[in-house]
Image (cartoon, rainbow, N blue to C red):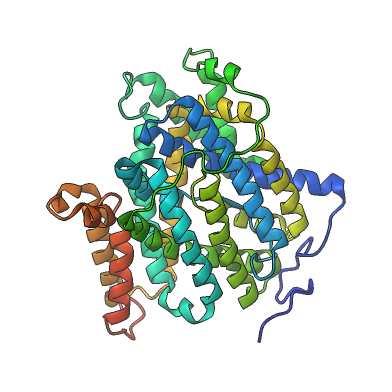
């Protein structure tokens, strides 16, 4: 039977503010800003990476950042307020998903950004359907499968982080000392603050590290503000600025990733309710949250932003503070929407040296990988399950690192199964977990 959301803790964890509570404005505003700070770096990093990979100009990069902030704010409001069945009515913070980066780069390299947006738009509807029928589908996505895919995503992104830390692929000063210094500085500051900082200093450690790195890069002569000066102070978000193109191979590749992000969202919502209030998430909360995930990504494609999903770092913030109030997160979402109307802010972020971005990206990408390890570890580590992980990682990462192995396949098939290897890893994990007989042993040592 579903647990009714009446502000009553179902376990030993009692929230400081429950879902429907409204803290005083003097508390709600800084608490909302804290959520924005915790997710801001991750939200803007993805469009910067995609723009760099596709060779977009600084102005276009700034516009993508502006749209990422605008869409994240509206998608978060959809989660906290909800419209009908769409939305979890929980403190779920939405933002641009790292998990789509490798496949987006592969799609963009063949079809451009219009191909990315078109595939994301179609696949977003697929996630809405998954959310609507979530309850009977959940058995196909146990932690073993989800963890394997998340681990593949993290490992696939690590080379991207290293390339940026060295200055960016194709940069004349690639690997120069000043680039490694900036990336290393950001990384060290982030680690120290994360481990020894308190409250917001710990939760926003990546953002703080990137700000420090950015400021230090200015007197080093590594930042040019020419594009910032030419950017306008205020501009309405424009839909369909890059257009949309629809290609079956790109759409199919996106469909696989939307399955993955569906499972990740289920985990994030469960983490919010358990960590913040000591109870399991209801079927209504899970279904509504996943449906809002899909609707948010559909809206993102219309407004030139990349797919959105729930942000795990904010799940940890809810657990850490005990503040379950969706009112607080709604205030944070309003700040994101406001930032989406100020192009000059996007331009300031767009001229950030890639080495500074790399210092934070390495940690964020590695954190995705470790999250996958945690999910896998929650399953029985017997020979059967380890085989599922091994084969999925072997084929997924192997083909991702050696895409020429599939060079004689049709281009449409090549796009789906090469590149990052995430699609291969997901399909193989789903297939093997479905067909291999279950083992009764708890671990490899028990067999």
Quadrant including the C terminus: bottom left
The answer to whether residue 83 of the structure is visible from this angle is: yes
Residue located 32% across and 30% down the image: 169
The x, y position of residue 34, in whole percent, is: 69, 44
Residue at the left extreme, as displayed: 408
Q: Nearer the viewer, residue 309 or 395?
A: 309
- Lateral position of residue 162 relative to residue 308, left or right: left
| Rendering quarter of residue 5 | bottom right
The x, y position of residue 386, in whole percent, is: 29, 70
- Lateral position of residue 93 relative to residue 177, left or right: right
Quadrant including the N terminus: bottom right
Q: Nearer the viewer, residue 287 or 363?
A: 287
The answer to whether residue 91 of the structure is visible from this angle is: no
393 shown above or below 429: above
Residue located 53% across and 19% down the image: 227
- Lateral position of residue 435 relative to residue 123, left or right: left
The x, y position of residue 220, in whole percent, is: 49, 13
Residue located 55% across and 29% down the image: 349
- Lateral position of residue 27 relative to residue 300, left or right: right
**Picture mark count:** 0
The x, y position of residue 39, in whole percent, is: 59, 45
17 shown above or below 69: below
Residue located 58% across and 25% down the image: 348
């Amino acid at each position: 039977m579903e647990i009714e959301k009446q502000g009553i803790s179902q376990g030993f964890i009692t929230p400081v503010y429950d879902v429907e509570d409204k803290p005083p404005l003097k508390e709600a505003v800084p608490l909302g800003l804290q959520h924005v700070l915790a997710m801001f770096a991750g939200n803007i990093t993805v469009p910067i990476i995609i723009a760099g990979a596709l060779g977009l100009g600084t102005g276009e990069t700034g516009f993508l950042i502006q749209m990422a902030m605008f869409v994240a704010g509206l998608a978060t409001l959809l989660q906290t307020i909800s419209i009908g069945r769409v939305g979890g009515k929980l403190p779920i913070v939405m933002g641009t998903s790292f998990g789509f980066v490798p496949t987006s780069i592969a799609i963009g390299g063949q079809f451009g950004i219009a191909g990315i947006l078109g595939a994301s738009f179609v696949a977003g509807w697929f996630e809405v359907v998954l959310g609507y029928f979530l309850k009977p589908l959940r058995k196909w996505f146990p932690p073993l499968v989800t963890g394997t895919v998340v681990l593949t995503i993290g490992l696939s992104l690590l080379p991207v982080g290293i390339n940026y830390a060295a200055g960016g692929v194709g940069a004349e000063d690639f690997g120069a000392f000043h680039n490694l210094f900036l990336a290393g500085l950001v990384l060290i500051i982030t680690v120290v603050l994360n481990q020894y900082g308190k409250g917001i200093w710990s939760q926003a450690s990546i953002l703080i590290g990137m700000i420090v790195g950015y400021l230090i890069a200015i007197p080093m002569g590594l930042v040019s503000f020419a594009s910032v000066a030419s950017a306008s102070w205020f501009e309405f978000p424009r839909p369909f600025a890059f257009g949309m193109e629809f290609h079956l191979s790109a759409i199919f590749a996106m469909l696989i990733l939307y399955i993955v992000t569906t499972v990740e969202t289920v985990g994030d919502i469960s983490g919010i309710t358990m960590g913040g209030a000591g109870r399991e998430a209801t079927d209504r909360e899970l279904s509504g949250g996943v449906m809002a995930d899909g609707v948010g990504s559909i809206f993102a494609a219309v407004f030139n932003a990349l797919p959105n999903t729930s942000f795990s770092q904010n799940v940890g913030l809810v657990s850490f503070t005990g503040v379950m109030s969706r009112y607080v997160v709604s205030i944070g979402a309003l700040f994101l929407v406001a930032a989406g109307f100020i192009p000059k802010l996007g331009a300031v972020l767009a001229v950030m040296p890639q080495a500074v971005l790399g210092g934070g990206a390495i940690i964020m990408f590695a954190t995705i990988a470790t999250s996958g390890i945690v999910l896998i570890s929650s399953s029985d580590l017997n020979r059967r399950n380890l085989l599922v992980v091994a084969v999925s990682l072997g084929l997924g990462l192997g083909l991702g690192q050696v895409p020429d192995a599939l060079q004689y396949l049709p281009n449409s098939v090549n796009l789906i199964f090469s590149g990052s290897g995430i699609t291969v890893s997901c399909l193989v994990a789903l297939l093997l977990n479905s067909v291999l007989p279950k083992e009764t042993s708890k671990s490899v040592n028990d067999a």
